[in-house]
Image (cartoon, helix red, strand yellow):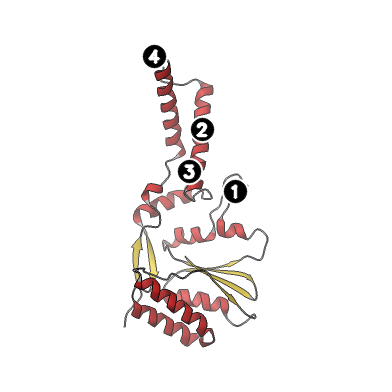
Amino acid sequence: MDKLHTNRFAVLSPELVVPSQEAMECGFISKLIQMKQNLAPGFRKEKLGYQQERKAKSLAADAHSRRLREVGLGSLTKEARAQVTALAHAGAALSGPQTESAVYELAAKIHAESPWMRDVSSWIMTQLLAHVSAGGRGLAVPPVILSGPPGIGKSHYARRLAELAGVPSRLIDVGSGSAGFRITGTEKGWSSAQAGIPVEMILSSRVANPVMVVNRHAKLTHLGGL
């Protein structure tokens, strides 16, 4: 019987790793000194004055923040960015079915446990078969909304699918007005910068495709496979 496997893949290109703010400050200061030397041949100082150095550091801080936003890391703390950098070089796991037979096995198991969700199971199987046929690996489905009366097992189904596929999952309750920040994170400038739950899951589990089960209210479940 074909088993589910785990491969490791890069989740962030090393080229996207942002230099530290300190390194960018040194670069700005060095360029400013060079510019002054080029414009004024008699300028031989190796250091800037207080105001000029302060201006260079301010420009570097703005450039650093802008670069973080460009690569999607603006909401992460310095510690979390260090973890992302490590993942950029070491890679993270893509867990779940790697072959067509593994997809059929997974679909059969989830259908046997939740036969009333057969339409959802069939759709997921179709998506995974297309993913594997195209050379993809691991559990990967587009975000899907499971709608129905409370108590039919929508959230249980989503979490059980992740469990059978060997993928970590997280239940996110988005009933409050600020719940969106739990998914996207908050950037610097708020009372505290914090990564969203999907990013936290990837960093803590080192699995690149965790399943996010988003509950908006009792009748709606949003299944997001990253």
Residue 196 position (above or below residue 189) = below
How far apart are the two marked residues, 2 and 4, measured between alpha carbons? 25 Å
Q: Nearer the viewer, mark 4 or mark 1?
A: 4
Q: Are marks 2 and 4 in contact (CB under 8 Å)?
A: no
Q: Are marks 4 and 1 in contact (CB under 8 Å)?
A: no
Give whichever of discs 1 and 3 has the lower sequence position: 3
Identify the residue position indicated by label 3 in the image: 67
Q: Is residue 167 left or right of residue 135?
A: right
Identify the residue position indicated by label 4 in the image: 41
Residue at (42, 36) in percent of width and height:
23
How far apart are the two marked residues, 2 and 3, measured between alpha carbons? 12 Å
Identify the residue position indicated by label 1 in the image: 192
How far apart are the two marked residues, 1 and 2, measured between alpha carbons? 23 Å
Q: Are marks 1 and 2 in contact (CB under 8 Å)?
A: no
Q: Nearer the viewer, mark 2 or mark 4?
A: 4
Q: Are marks 3 and 4 in contact (CB under 8 Å)?
A: no
Residue 133 position (above or below residue 24) = below
Identify the residue position indicated by label 2 in the image: 59
Give whichever of discs 2 and 3 has the lower sequence position: 2
Give whichever of discs 1 and 2 has the lower sequence position: 2
Residue at (43, 79) in percent of width and height:
125
Q: Nearer the viewer, mark 1 or mark 2?
A: 2
Q: Which mark is residue 103?
A: none
Residue at (60, 83) in percent of width and height:
152
How far apart are the two marked residues, 3 and 4, measured between alpha carbons? 33 Å
Q: Residue 29 occupies which quadrant of the picture?
A: top left
Circle 1: element type: loop
How far apart are the two marked residues, 1 and 3, measured between alpha carbons? 19 Å
Amino acid type of the residue that numbered disc 2 sits on in the rendered structure: Leu
Q: Nearer the viewer, mark 1 or mark 3?
A: 3
Amino acid type of the residue that numbered disc 1 sits on in the rendered structure: Ser
160 or 100: which is nearer to us? 100
